[in-house]
Image (cartoon, grey):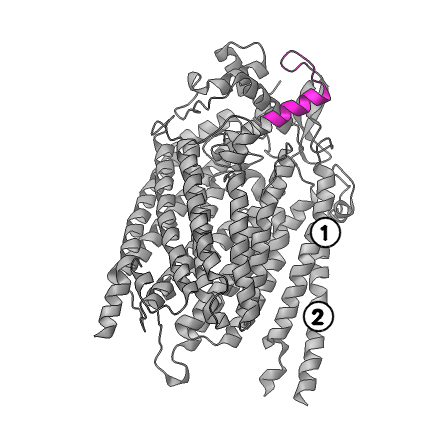
Amino acid sequence: MLTSIKNNHLKYESQKLGMMYFRVAIILFGAQLLMGLIAAIQFMYPAFLYGVFDFSVARMVHINALVVWMLYAMIGSVYLMLPDETGIETVGIGLGKLAFWVLTAAVTVVVLVFIFIQIGPGKESSIWLINEGREYLEAPRWADIGIVVVVLIFYYNVFFTYMKGQRTGIMTVMVANLMALAGLYLAGMFFTDNISMDQYWWWWVIHLWVEATWEVFVGTLAAYALIKIIDAKREIVEMWLWIEVLMLFGSGILGLGHHYFWIGTPEYWWEIGALFSALEPVPLVAMFVHVLYDWGKEQGANGEKPVIKNGPAMAWLVTNAFGNFLGAGIWGFFHTLPQVNIYTHGTQFTAAHGHLAFFGAYATILIGMMYYGIQRAYGIERLKATFKSKMAITLIVFGMLGMTVALTIAGYEQVLVERAELGAGWDAYFVAQALPWMKQAMAWRTVMGVVMVVGFVYLIWDLVTIGPKEAKENNQ
Amino acid sequence: MAKSHSVWTSIRFWRQSAAWVTGFAVVLLILLTFDTMRQIKMGSKRVPAPTVINHHIDYKYSKKRGHEVPVIGKKELFFGKEWSPKEAAALLHKGKLTEQAKNCMDCHTLLGNGAYYAPDLTKAWLDPKWKDMQAMIGAKTREEAMAKFLQHPEMYPTHERRMPNLKITAEEAQALVAFLKHMSSIDTNGFPRGFSKTVSDFKAGGTYAH
Amino acid sequence: MFFEKFTDVYPSFWGWLNQGPLTLTLFLHTIIILPMIWLYFKEKKRLEQEDK
């Protein structure tokens, strides 16, 4: 991946820019894992870095690195697919490159401020310059505005390339969905004294991103990748894509209601949140069936030998289909009904779901796209998985599943003891945290986190070396 | 040829359906949002006005609604005085700003949202723990105990996991306590259920809080 | 058992629909899905005409 830009196999500047986004994304992924490890250790040994680099700081950088690396990889994927789908070079590519550097500089400054300044006094200036203090949206207001400008440039490029070039169904969904995705960010950019109002709009960004627009984004990526990797038929893939849009937005938009059970909002959200979000797993099953169906159908059709043009990418794509269904679908459904959620809301249950869902639904397919980018950058006809690719996916998936199971057990214990038995107060909280089963779960979570980090080392090693290695073998 | 007759494989049908469903769900969400905005604006029954800090607040089981609801009682002094609407609003504003600037949400949960490293703060004002803390800190009132704790949490450890010193000033601490008291008066449809109660308290109604 | 007295804080159209056995959510799902039947028959007619 390091030398891929110097390679001449990428015909379009847009695709080279995409590879640049991937590079930053994978570095931020590493930062996310490191911060997660610190936070996990603090759960076991609270004195670790106490008063120097507190849990709140590690956790803030952990989740912000997550969001930002995924946005980077998403933008990278779009720049990669844009010329393929439209048949032309991206318009305003020079501006796009400038935006990349501006965004990367801004992200660096924000992270440095998070790490070294951490918090500010209770004044407007802190919100503008240091930390907005709203989970996932901690980036200070100046950075918010910067992000909006950069995203506008990105969207301008995508939209006008789409208008100028060939308009496929995949790109139609992409263009419409990206507009919603970018626009929703604005809902998180204001201050109010009213915490209920604050949380109401905060969820517009968080939920309508991860449970609606990001999911549709993944659907479009998967459609594109299936065409490229296993020669799936465009008509079939695009028909599925529209069905997925229908079901994802149909359930996901009003599924927002499951965040409005307990934040001061009216009781009618119970019913809306419960039933619409209960349907949210359906499109995820559909996506899963679709990927496997296409795979099975394309293999050996017309008596040809089955060809998977990119082994590692396909492996991550199948992991995505499975992980999305399991993490977002099953783990989400676990606690989406208000009768259950009144006890599980704000416990380790949420953490278990959050980990597996973000990983299964997004991390997997974005890593797959990185492998696909490498294949293109080195002009490899058929990219086969190496030993390192296999180690990476095995260890990362195993580590993540292990963490999820540990957190689920911790959550179960917390729900029963702290919430159901003792009623969620200060003492109730610490009694539950001190129980041996909670401590064991937290220890296992750390162990599994280490497993995942080892997998990540293999991943980055593989991403750097697989291109040159396979290109050499293919040319012999 | 028969295949071309099937609507189920028609891209146009799915595209039109997707556009309709998405568009209409958005319209419904906007309508619902307008209604919710009306119900949760500051000074409504669900989210009381900042002057609620001048009142006694409890959290009691309501037979009618089938869960606990905040009960706003008679007047009581807050930090030794009654706050005018203007003063109370300014204090709450400062409290919310401090809550964000100190990044409370990346350890605690507020209304159940945030991180899971420390207790939920939704009804923190009502927590019976403050009685013990008041004695430990040597404070005359609950609000004084909370304010003192927030300024020097490292001095009053209750557990291996301690809150760090976030350089909260006396002014900010007072504002934060107001923010927490206000949050405890929000009608959260019964979350958290059975806050800090045993079964007998639950049956008798009322909380440990006061 | 299924129909309850209005319990929410403020009366509203949505709150009123919320009193029966899942009436609010069934109502919303129905009005979202019903027009798809019309879309279906419109598309079927179009496909048949195209075939002629």
Position in image of residue A325 (x %, y %): 48, 58
> Most extreme residue toward the left, as rendered?
A476
Give the side of residue A124 with respect to residue A58, left or right. Answer: right
Residue at 44% x, 25% y is B163
Residue nearest the viewer, comparing C1 with A311: A311
Query: Which of the marked residues, 1 or 2, is nearer the chain's N terminus?
Result: 1
Give the side of residue B2 with respect to residue C5, left or right. Answer: left
Position in image of residue A166 (x %, y %): 53, 73
Give amino acid for label 1: Leu
Position in image of residue A317 (x %, y %): 41, 63
Residue at 49% x, 50% y is A331
Residue nearest the viewer, comparing C16 with A232: A232
> Most extreme residue toward the front, as rendered?
A94
Above or below A8: residue A418: above
Position in image of residue A129 (x %, y %): 50, 34
Q: Is residue A19 visible?
A: yes
Give amino acid for label 2: Ile
- Please give the range of residues in magenta: B77-94
Q: Residues within 10 Å of mark 1 (few under 14, many from 20)?
A: many
> Tag on residue C24?
1
Image quadrant in which the N terminus of chain B is located: bottom right
Residue marked by disc 2: C37
